[in-house]
Amino acid sequence: MVLWGIRLLFIMMKETVILKKGIKINHIWFSNENEEPTKKADIYFYHGIEKPVLIKNSIIITQNTAVTDISNNINEIYNNISKNYKYEIRRGKKEKLEVKFYRKIDQALLNRFEYCYNQMFHTKGMKVKLNKALLKKYFDEGYAYMSIVYFENKEMAFHVYLIENGRSRFLYSCSECRNVDVDKNLIGRANKFLHMYDYYLLKNEGVTQYDWGGIMDFTNPSGIDKLKLNLAGKYQKKSYFNQMIGISIFGKFIIKILKLFSNNH
């Protein structure tokens, strides 16, 4: 908002600059239309913006998501969850699952999360790897949070969120269910229990809007989409955009190359 020539920013966007393969990328979260980045980079990568910037040197990806309002009583969300999920959450409580919330993480915890996350995709035959350096910077800059559910002092599932001024974005999740020595049913209960517990943790941090981090298909949801939607209660469907913009000459060249290898023009 601009008033008498003075820009008033009620929600400060978050900027995290990372160097990847020689390219300086500014990852921008929680941006408002009137805000402009302050950190120089070859590429500005806007996440979750309502209106993309229509310029030549950019790539725009549309994303759908579900948003849960957690400003009211969390029990209302719980009441809208399916009977099966309620049963699993109640059973998880009886099994004395323990949840811890981390605003800061050390290198050892970051390494364990990285291993769990990468293994999860490896067992699916997918070449997806955690950008550990970027995640570390999110924590170092104070807007990433991690929740972990434990059973008998063993880590069962991890969730990572980005939080800023009443808004949260579900960023990463992984569990030990790919470990053959772990009860997969217990892992499933623990993960649902953690999601329910996250509502309380996030609300305690002042969050009112809980973004589930993307839904691929509302009409024909995948397994992970079904999990999110079943736990989301009465949610709002929302569409937004992720946009990469070439800023420097080098950045514009990289965007041009990326567009050649995609259908995004």
Image: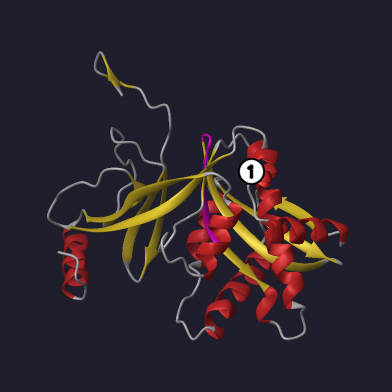
| Residue 152 locus on image (x, y percent) | 87, 67
Residue span colored magenta: 165-172
Q: Is residue 198 left or right of residue 173?
A: right
Kind of residue indicated by mark 1: Ile
- Rendered view: 231 above or below 184: above
Instruction: Give the quarter of the figure containing the N terminus.
Output: top left
Considering the numbered disc 1 on the image, is that residue within a helix, a strand or a loop?
Answer: helix
Quadrant of the image occupied by residue 74: top right
> Is residue 255 in view from this perspective?
yes
- Is residue 102 in sight in this rendering? no
Residue 202 position, x and y percent, is 63, 42
In x, y percent, where is residue 117?
58, 72
Looking at the image, which is closer to me, 70 or 30? Answer: 70
Q: Residue furthest top?
A: 4
| Vertical placement of residue 9 versus 146, above or below | above
Taking the spot 41% from the left edge, 62% from the top edge, the residue there is 219
Q: Is 165 positioned to the left or the right of 231 in the image?
A: left
Q: Position of residue 187 (x, y in %)?
A: 72, 70
Q: Residue at x 66, y 49 (%)?
A: 198
Quarter location, residue 39: top left
For disc 1, the marked residue is 77
Q: Is residue 212 magenta?
A: no
Q: Magenta stretch: dominant SS?
A: strand
